[in-house]
Amino acid sequence: MHRSLKKNETATQRATHLPDFSRFAGVLLFLLLAAGFLSACKSSRPTTSGRSTTIYIKDPTILQQRADSLFFAAERSKILGDYRTAITQFSDYLRLIKTNPTAYYELSRLFIEVRNPGYALGFAKRAASMDTTNKWFQITLADAFGIAGQFDSAAAVYGKLAIQYPDNDEYLYNKGMFLTKAEQPEAALAVFNQLEKKVGLVEELAIQKERLLLKLDRVDDAAEEIHKLVNQYPGEVRYYLLLADIYSANDRQDEAIALYKSSLELDAANPRALIALANYAKKSGNHAQYWSYLTRAFANPDYNIDEKVSYVYPYLQMQGTDTTKLREGLQLAQLVIEAHPEEAKAYALQADMYSQANMLDSALYDYKKAVSLDSTRYSVWYQMMWIYSRKEDPANLLKVSNVVAQRFPKEFMGHYFQGVANFLLQNYPASIEALNEALINGNVDKSMKADVYSLLGDAYHATGQHEDSDSSYDRSLLLKPNDATVLNNYSYYLSLRGEQLQKAESMSRHSLELEPGSINYMDTYAWVMFRMGRYELAKQWMEKALQSPQAKENPGMLEHYGDILFNLHNVDKALEYWRLAKEKGANSVGLARKIAEKRYILATERE
């Protein structure tokens, strides 16, 4: 046991030592017992908090009885934790009896509790000036100065208390601490030196002196304070590390390294010493030594897992430019798992490494392990949804997003991915429901909200709810007017219905301005021209699209070109492209009729 500062009066003693209450002692004891009973029974709070209407009571006996009643009610409210009611009741007491310093003291303590430094200090000053001999009033005054940020004044009060009560070492220590907060390091150092002469070598004093000496740029003196601890307790590794940290922070590498190595002689697996030595080895370019120290530290289960995770995460960024960092990061992540096999964050760390490296199956394995250990980690569930989305696996995406939407109903992404998965699985009503739920719960940026409205537009179109579809697309474009995909889809669906064709033409043209090389957008624009009866222009845009090898393999585009050619009276060529479309996989009833009847039949939707 290291020696600690002598504290003659405990916090409990201070709390229960109520100054100037001798004539109320019996009643106060009853109140304390009654408060405990009331609290246990959860009874209602007292109703005597209203403002007094008997301020001008002339009979001194009645006045004293009324004042005593208010005082006891205030004490009861304070005991029950109803500080604001207690403040009101003590204030009413003072309207009747202005000469009791204890009431001012009590109000100061209450205002300290509710963090009102101005009132706390005002009442503390009044109590201390009315009774200069009561140490509790002085302590409260110092506390009030402290929360008001007047640290030098707080130090002065504790200085006087230290003179009045020389056996109480706490007062002198508090004086030094407040001088430290007042940015008076020389004065604080003198106080701590004075205290050390009284109590001898104590860790908390040595550390406070070390900090002050470092602030004064007296590095050797600061180190000497910790050296004293090392000499006094040569088996305590913490002191070697403290001393090493001083030298390390002041670029005295050799002395720091020697002390870190001395720490390892006392504790061979000490993570702080190992990490420090690893960093020194890294700076000197000795990768083998760096890796040896680092892996020893990571294998230690006593090395805090959060610190390990923080150390590994930079590897996520580095692995993009240095492939060796992926291997090192995964090795460290595996060591974290081995040292902390029941920690969800250990598996999540390794999963993040795999995910960043696009090793999605491995990432999923570890994310699943993480949620099996701790199902409350939303971030892990989110990563699982994101991976299933990247893998284009709507069935599993739906399973996970259903769980997330249920467990985390206020999280936007659970509902959003639920909507995406149902859309891809052609469960359009369920998709619509989930996406609308996402809009209700989602506190997301405009771009993400625009994406939701875009997908809603697609889902409503698929169910034939054209008015809702158009409204959703309009809202999406209001938030993100240059979304080429929405412009294209909206314009195409309007053209299919033969509605608002001028609007469809404008949106389709804008999508091509945004992405002039898109064959899908060319096809849409050609189809809009076709629906407007501008067949030559439609032919030009369709032929421009068909210059692409991908377009020549697209059955829908080939069928569209056939439709355009037929309406330009080139029946033989139209039949050729309709047949070619069928060979490439088009199988609509309309196409079969076109070929059989050798005439154009209006299609109501894209195949």
Image (cartoon, rainbow, N blue to C red):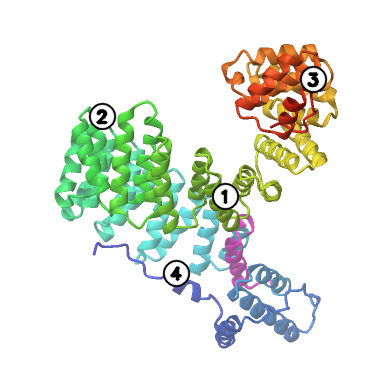
What type is the residue that disc 3 sits on? Answer: Phe
What type is the residue that disc 1 sits on? Answer: Leu
In the picture of the structure, the residue carrying the numbered disc 4 is: 11
In the rendered view, tell whether residue 272 sits above or below residue 32.
Answer: above
Q: Secondary structure at mark 3?
A: helix
In the picture of the structure, the residue carrying the numbered disc 1 is: 398
In the rendered view, tell whether residue 540 sits above or below residue 185.
Answer: above
Q: CA distance from mark 2 to mark 1?
A: 48 Å
Spot occupied by residue 175 in the image (x, y as percentages of width and height): 42, 55
Spot occupied by residue 301 in the image (x, y as percentages of width and height): 28, 54
Residue 378 located left or right of residue 501: left
Q: Report the magenta residues as a range.
A: 98-119
Quarter the N terminus occupies: bottom left
Q: CA distance from mark 1 to mark 4?
A: 57 Å
Quarter the C terminus occupies: top right
Which callout, 4 or 3, points to the residue nearer the camera? 3
Residue 401 located left or right of residue 450: left
In the picture of the structure, the residue carrying the numbered disc 2 is: 283
Q: Quadrant of residue 573?
A: top right
Point out the tag, 3 or 2, that comes first from the N-terminus: 2
Report crowding for label 4: few under 14, some 14 to 19, many 20 or more residues within 10 A (C-alpha).
Answer: few
Point out the tag, 1 or 3, that comes first from the N-terminus: 1
Q: Which mark is residue 222?
A: none
Q: Is residue 371 magenta?
A: no
- Total number of numbered labels? 4
Q: CA distance from mark 1 to mark 3?
A: 39 Å
Q: CA distance from mark 4 to mark 2?
A: 49 Å
Say which of 211 and 58 sits in front: 211
Q: Secondary structure at mark 1?
A: helix
Which callout, 1 or 4, points to the residue nearer the camera? 1
Q: Secondary structure at mark 4?
A: helix
What type is the residue that disc 4 sits on? Answer: Ala
